[in-house]
Amino acid sequence: MNYLPKRKFMSNSEWSTLLGLGLTVLGCSLKWSTAPPDSLSSIGAYYLSKKDHTRNAFDLSVGRVSVGWLIVIAAIISAAMLMLDAYGPHRIAQRNAHITGGVVIVALSILYFALQFGVLFAILGGALIVYGGLDRYRLS
């Protein structure tokens, strides 16, 4: 007979990290801001007034890098820490990478804060990633 204890499919920290990854990536594609571009003529102003001027995280930038790509890369790096053993020899570095990814997401979201669904989803996703990192490595 096999008397090995059953392992749960996924722990709470793994669920929260993956849910945070999904919310973060979804939040990057949703609306982050509304700002019409400057117009030089009255015809251009009429044309621009008829368009929807929503911007998502990929339309915003920090220097030359898109905010959306920074957030997606931070979320993927944090979720990639789930593939490594939580009790291995490099657990402190893994914990720091996992939590830092979530903190970067929350910081960039607060930097471009607006009451839009994209920003709020990214903040919630980053907070879930931070919670997942803290919960996963709390015993190590």
Image (spheres, rainbow, N blue to C red):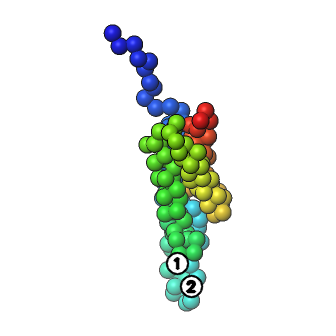
Label 1: which residue?
48
Q: Position of residue 128 (x, y in %)?
A: 58, 43
Q: Amino acid at mark 2?
A: Ser
Q: Quadrant of residue 134?
A: top right
The crowding category of the residue bearing disc 2, from other C-alpha atoms within 10 Å (few below 14, some 14 to 19, many at least 20), is few
Q: Residue furthest top?
A: 1
| Residue beneath the point at 39% across and 13% down | 3
Which element is circle 2 on? Answer: loop
Instruction: Please provide percent x and percent y for residue 137.
Output: 58, 38
For the question of whether residue 128 can be seen, the reply is no
Which mark, residue 39? 2
Q: Residue at x 53, y 75 (%)?
A: 64
Q: Are marks 2 and 1 in contact (CB under 8 Å)?
A: yes
- Is label 1 in a helix, a strand or a loop? helix
Q: Is residue 8 left or right of residue 31?
A: left
| Residue 3 in view | yes
Amino acid at circle 1: Leu
Work out which quarter of the rendered image holds the C terminus and state it.
top right
